[in-house]
Image (cartoon, coloured by chain):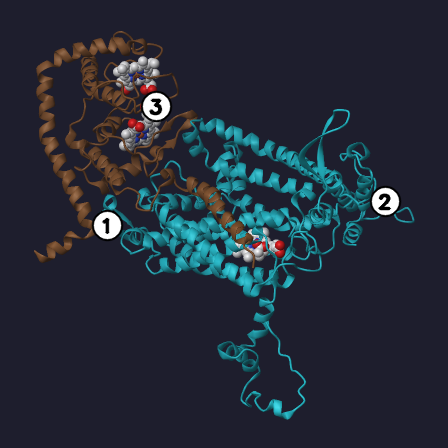
Amino acid sequence: MNSLAARRRHPAAIALLLLLGLLVTGAVYSALAPQRVQAAAAADAGQDAAQGKKLFQANCATCHGLNATGTEDGPSLVGVGAASVDFQMGTGRMPMAAPGVQAPRSDKIKFSNEQIAQIGAYVATLGPGPSVPDSKYTDGTSGDAGRGGEIFRVNCAMCHNAAGAGGALTRGKYAPTLQGVKGKHIYEAMETGPQSMPVFNDSNLDPQAKADVITYLKSMEREGNPGGYKLGGLGPVPEGLFAWTIGLAVMVGAAVWLGQKGA
Amino acid sequence: MTTHTSYPQSADALRASDRTARPGATAGQRKLGGVAGWVDDRTGAGKGVGYLMKKVFPDHWSFMLGEVAMYSMIICLLTGVFLTFWFVPSLGHTVYDGSYAPLKGVGMSEAYASTLNISFDIRGGLLIRQIHHWAALMFVVSLSVHMMRVFFTGAFRKPRELNWVIGSVLALLAAVEGFAGYSLPDDLLSGTGIRAMNGFMQSAPVIGSYLTYAVFGGAFPGEAIIPRLYSAHVLLIPAILIGLFTAHIVLVAVQKHTQFPGPGRTNDNVVGYPVMPVYAAKAGGFFFIVFGILALMGALFQINAIWAYGPYDPSPVTAGSQPDWYMWFTDGALRLLPGWLEFETFGFTWSMNIFPGSLLLLPLVYVLLAIYPFVEAWATGDKREHHLLDRPRNNPTRTAIGAAAIAAYTVLALACTNDIIAIKLHMSINDITIALRILLFVLPPIVFWVTKRICLALQAYDRDTVLHGRESGRLVRTAEGRFFEAHEPLDEYTRWKLVQQEIPQPLELESGVDANGVRSPKGKHAALRSRLSNFYYRDRVDAVTPSELEAAHHDGHGHEAIEPHDAPASVGTSAHATEDDMRS
Ligand code: HEM
């Protein structure tokens, strides 16, 4: 008892407690949530798809065509699956606001989760495609972070940067930062390969490997920035600029101040 | 420092209470006493220290930039010693089992594992690591700015050319030292840097692969490179840095510090505070200020988050891999060099798409830097000693050369960050690269021209101010109802700064033909030299001469009477005359 009380004050105790909390919530969530969704889905799948079709024709058909078979302004969605819709709409990429080299991520999501699910159900009826992943793979705690990190560095770092800070591709395209992206969307991105990103299907990276990658990215987020303010997390470039601007200005300021002090 | 004086004493009685030095007392004890005397007796250091203490150091904030470099270097050394206690310079394999969760159970080198250990499991380790890295960056930043200060004020002129050369070597070594340190942790980012270095060496014509084998002790990556970089980083380069730096400082003391022109400041004196006590107190205080700033940077701003990159492994590459800033320009040159420059002859591959950027540019930049004082001295035929600094505007061509060089360097450095620029400013990386290729050739000449014009304009403005006084901001209405702004005459101290400069005449071309009509072999050199001298001094705004000043003062109503300042003044002036007249 005594030794337990003493350890309660150990700094790791807080981290451990947090982790435990996350684990418990994660476990409870994964035990409860999917069943509800499945139950609901089973009941009115047909109704969802019908509702989804209406929403689609109102919001998406201008670019993707009335039957989602594509136009000059947008690709066909036959066979992209509900996962693709969930990713594109859940990250605010679709409906695309303005034509550009790449549909950017946006925080303004114009549709409710329910509406997104309905459109997803509709697109899923057009042809077989990946569905929204099971949350047991996407909660960010169910994998092996170490293994996930190795997979990430080999498969993703060349575009997304080893720290997941993002990177430039050719001609204005870019791989966005992965910080703050939901586990579900990370999974869907690997599964559907949006735009210039390759598809990592289950024979490439099985669901457990994907869960490992998500766990790695999430555990990095949990660690935060132990060294202080991270200056954008882009490595030596912001660091060098910081030294040349703020660092130099403060040093020169100190020199000027001291230089003015007389004897 | 007080010296010993003896007073004539007439009566023995007066001497009764005199404390004569006991027979045992030595020279050092008499002079200094205590521990200092003890040391002096054994080393004779008293003389040298006394000499240094009596040195006078002029006050100007820009003279403290060298000090910032010096203190940053010292802080690097101190924090570096701490890091050596725990860092393991080995590429031996280990499995991480420390407290950073995302890397638990990952196989890595001992070097990387020990750096993680310093960051997460050694008390204060992360702070010291971060101070060390920020101090290294600020060391190179401040020595570069110090160098610019020396350049733009002409402090590198005779007799300080040698110290400039030492400085250039210091600058190069500082960059090499930083690169070696940056490579040690063996994380994915620094490993990529070593991989690049490996490629650079291979690009050397003919000897490339042998060179790489020798340095890496076999094929890449091998086991030898980290231990070798480690001895270079903690032993070899610091030893040379400290040695050269000491020589640098001793030379400053021996040659005395330069000073900005001002009343009472001549080429033969130094006006300022003696080292003891004022300057020493200031410098000591400044050390702690610099230390404090670096400690704050280390405590508040994360730098080189090696844990986020993961261990080095030759197969993955990461987007956004840059070296620390002082190596950007070489990496940038590589990104700008077009790929079609590679070709094969005689069974060798000539990697001209890599070689010029990787192996030629770095030494070239530092050699150009080191020889500049000699080039300028030769081109202008200036063999005199200079202890008074130039105001940058008073040597427009030199200032413009410096600005153009900085522009070229900046373009190269920015090229290295092209992918970060692309992602942050939402631009196409291809467009940025093309734009920078063009800028590399176009920007320096433009900067040269603009800087030179600005300097000439500022000189003209100075001239104007001396002749007509400064604008008072007071509007005066004449009897006829016209308005003009009243000008107030300058006080003598202000005026001195504006008229003291000596603007040299371009060298005349001596006829390259001797008395017998034979072309002298020196003719060609003389022609080149006269052309260069013209390049430096053809466009000129002469300092106001005393007679011009007289004329301006006697002639009460300003402007019309003064010749337009963009036309070269016809009077051949010598600054010394000015100096004498002003003094009387
Ligand atoms: C290791 C890096 C360096 C350190 C620690 C250092 C330190 C100093 C210090 C403390 C001074 C006297 C104060 C001052 O004028 O700022 C000085 C003067 C000087 N430094 Fe450096 N310096 C370094 C690098 C350089 C470089 C890269 C150059 C040029 C290539 C250079 C050229 C000079 C010259 C010519 C002087 C004499 C200036 C004068 O008397 O006006 N130094 N240095």
Q: Residue furthest front?
A: B479
The brown one among the chains is A
Q: In the rendering, at what x and y percent does residue B302 appear?
A: 36, 45
According to the picture, the residue beneath numbered tag 1 turns out to be: B99
Name which quarter of the figure residue A115 lies in: top left
* Front residue of B20 and B470: B470
According to the picture, the residue beneath numbered tag 3 turns out to be: A104
Asked if one can make out residue B213 in the rendered structure from this viewpoint, the answer is no
Mark pair 3, 1: CA separation: 36 Å
Q: Amino acid at mark 3?
A: Pro
- Left or right of B387? Residue B436 is left
Using the image, name the chain to which the residue with label 3 belongs.
A
* Front residue of B284 and B324: B284
Q: Report if the CB atoms under discs 2 and 3 are less than 8 Å apart.
A: no
Which mark's residue is nearer the viewer, 2 or 3?
A: 3
Residue for point 51% across, 77% down: B39
According to the picture, the residue beneath numbered tag 2 turns out to be: B511
The 10 Å Cα crowd at callout 1, few under 14, some 14 to 19, many 20 or more, is: some
- Left or right of B379? Residue A35 is left
